[in-house]
Image (cartoon, rainbow, N blue to C red):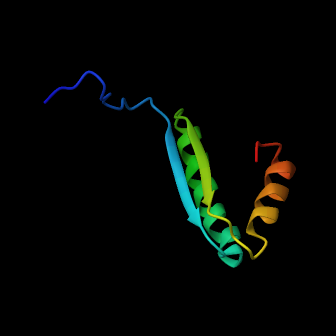
Amino acid sequence: MNDARVRTPRPSDGVSICISNWNHKTYLPRSLGSALAAADCLLAQGRGAEVLVIDDGSRDGSQRYLAGLAAMMGRPD
């Protein structure tokens, strides 16, 4: 079935790397390091890449950590 609303990705399209998080601040440095390394490899190949962290109301300081990291990197939080 070929639905006009469904677009087939092309090799030049970017990639979204999604990390889900809930009260796992301890693991964020390692998971973000891996995701950012993968994004760097994609960018070196001329492909777009973004890293998204989805946090559902963590209470362990995860959101503060991510906001500080985003500010340090000059990225949106």
Give the quarter of the image for residue 30.
Answer: bottom right
**Apparent side of residue 32 relative to residue 10 in the rendered image (left or right):** right
Give the camera-side residue of 41 and 76. Answer: 76
Q: Residue furthest left?
A: 1
x and y percentages locating residue 22 in the rendered image: 62, 71
Look at 58% across and 39% down and name the residue there.
Answer: 43
x and y percentages locating residue 25 in the rendered image: 71, 74
x and y percentages locating residue 18 in the rendered image: 53, 54
Look at 85% across and 49% down and name the residue there.
Answer: 71
Where 16 falls versus 8 (above or below)?
below
Placement of the N terminus among the 4 image quadrants: top left
x and y percentages locating residue 11 in the rendered image: 38, 32
Where 75 falls versus 7 (above or below)?
below
**Apparent side of residue 39 relative to residue 26 in the rendered image (left or right):** left
Q: Residue furthest top?
A: 4
Look at 58% across and 48% down and name the residue there.
Answer: 39
**Apparent side of residue 12 relative to residue 65 in the rendered image (left or right):** left
Give the quarter of the image for residue 20.
Answer: bottom right
Query: Across the whole image, how many numbered discs are drawn on residues?
Result: 0
